[in-house]
Image (spheres, helix red, strand yellow):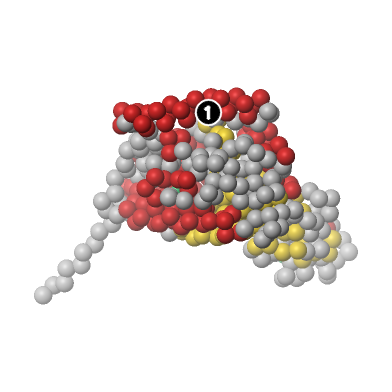
Amino acid sequence: MQQVVRQWRAVDPVDDDLFTLLAARKPGFSLPGALYTGQAAFDADMDVIFHRHWIVVGCEADVPEAGDVYAVDIGPSPIVLVRDDEGEIRAFHNVCSHRGAKIVPTGRAIVGKLVCPYHQWTYELSGELTGAPHMGIDFDKALHHLKPVAMRNVAGLIYVCLSNDPPVDIEDFAAAMEPRIAPYDLKNTKIAYETDLIEDGNWKLTMENNRECYHCAGNHPELALSFHSSDFGFDPTELNDDERADAEALAAAYAQKTSAWEACGLPSAAINNVVGHPTQFRTQRLIIAGHGESQTLDTRAACRVPLSDAVATGTGDTHLWTANGWNHFMGDHAVVFTVIPVSPDKTLVRTKWLVHKDAVEGEDYDLANLISVWVDTNREDADLVRIAHQGAQSAGYRPGPYSRFTERTLDDWSTWYVERMQANGY
Ligand code: FES
Ligand SMILES: [Fe+2]
C-alpha cells in the first residue's frame, strides 16, 4: 500500500516574498504570519531595524568605571561599550582590525587595554592601536584604529546605530527624553540585579506584547497592583457606572498631576512619535496606583535611597518605549529592558534593575522586593509571546484586528515596522 506523505506549509509559497508580505499588511491588523516566523523576515529585520536604526544596548551602569567593557552581540555584529580613561563611554565594533577576530568575549569585563586573543594586537580604551607585533617598521598603526559605532548617550541610556548613515532624528528623541530622564540621574546608578530571558517567540511579538496592556488584567496580577488599567485604553460603551466614575477620576488626576509635575520641571505629557519617525518612541509619566510610589507588590518604594532629590517623592513612573526596549523610571529605582533578536523564534529580553549607587542591599533595599513584580511579569509575558508565536506559525493563522481602544499603539507599531522596511528597500 502506498504510503501517504502529508505535506503542508504554514504559509503560501508566495508569502515567502517579503515585498508581498509587507504590502499585504492591512492597517488595523497584525502582520502576516511569515513576517513573525520566517527566516527571510528575520534576516531583513536584523538588516533594517538592528543595523540601520538606533537601538538601545545598555546604560551608564553597564560600564561604571574606566576600563569596564560590556560586549553585546547584535545578530552577527558584536559590539563593545568601553568606559575610557577620561570617563567617557565609547562604542566600537568588537572586531579586530587585523584579521577580524572578535576581541572581547560577550558580557562584562574589566580591562587595561583591549587585547585581541588571536595575535595580540593591542588597543587603548580610546580604540587606538598601540601594539601590533611583527608588522614591520613601515606599518602605520594609526590606520588601524578600532572601527567606532555611532553612539548616543541619552541621559544615561546608550543607543547605537551600526549604519554609517544613522537616522538624524535621534536628536529629536534626545531633545524630548533628556529632560525627562536626567532627573533620575542614571550616571549615579548601579545594577542591583539583571536577568536574561530567552523568549520562545519573534522579537516583534515581544515588542507588541509590551506595547499593550489589554492582556494585563488577565495575566499580570502583580503588575496590575501598580497600574491603572484604564491607562491603557477601554471601550467607553463597555464601562459600568463605577468603572466610568473611576476613569473620569483618573483623567482628572492626570490633568492635575501632569500640570503639577511640569510646573516642577518634570516633563510629563504623552509623546507618541512612532509612525513617520525612523527613531520611534513613546513616553508618558504615569500615575502609579495604590500608594503611588513604585512598581512593587505594596506599591511603596523598594529602595529608601531615591535616585535623586528631584524625583524623591510622588513623581510617578516615566514610561519610555523605543524600537527594541522599554523602561520604567521611578523615584526609588528604574527598570531598563533591552530586546535583542536571536533567531526567528528566540528573543533575548535583558532586564536591569537600577538603584542609586550608594544604596546597600539588605539595608536600603530588599532585593526580592525590588525585583519581584518584573520577574513575575517577564515570566508571564514570555508565556504569552510563546503562545502568540505558536499561533503565528500555524496554517490557521490570519492577521487579526487590533482593538482601536486598547491596541491602538500596536497599529502604530506595525505601521512603523512596515514603513521602515519598505523605506529601506524591502
Ligand atoms: S585577528 Fe586580532 S590580532 Fe590577529
Ligand atoms: Fe505583559
Secondary structure of the residue carrying numbered label 1: helix
Residue visible at 53% across and 49% down in the picture: 298
Where is 50 relative to 141, above or below? above
Q: Position of residue 402 (x, y in %)?
A: 35, 37
Above or below 128: residue 272: above
Which quadrant holds residue 233?
top left
Q: Residue furthest left?
A: 1
Residue at 57% x, 28% y is 257
- The answer to which quarter of the image holds residue 390 is bottom left
The front one of 58 and 309 is 309
Inspect the image, locate mark 1, and give the three-letter code of the amino acid beneath it. Answer: Tyr
- Which of these two is toward me, 137 or 426? 426
Query: Is 42 rendered above or below residue 30?
Result: below
Residue at 39% in and 45% down: 217
Residue with the mark numbered 1: 254
Q: Is residue 70 left or right of residue 294?
A: right
Q: Position of residue 248 (x, y in %)?
A: 43, 26
Camera-nearest residue between 415 and 308: 308
- Rendering coords of residue 342 (x, y %): 51, 58
Q: Name the image quarter holding the N terminus.
A: bottom left
Residue 212 shows in the view: yes
- Where residue 287 appears, as percent x and y from the top left, is 54, 36
Examine the rendering and report whether any part of residue 342 can be seen: no
| Dot 1 alpha-carbon crowd within 10 angstroms: few under 14, some 14 to 19, many 20 or more | some
- Which residue is nearer to you in this view: 72 or 356? 356
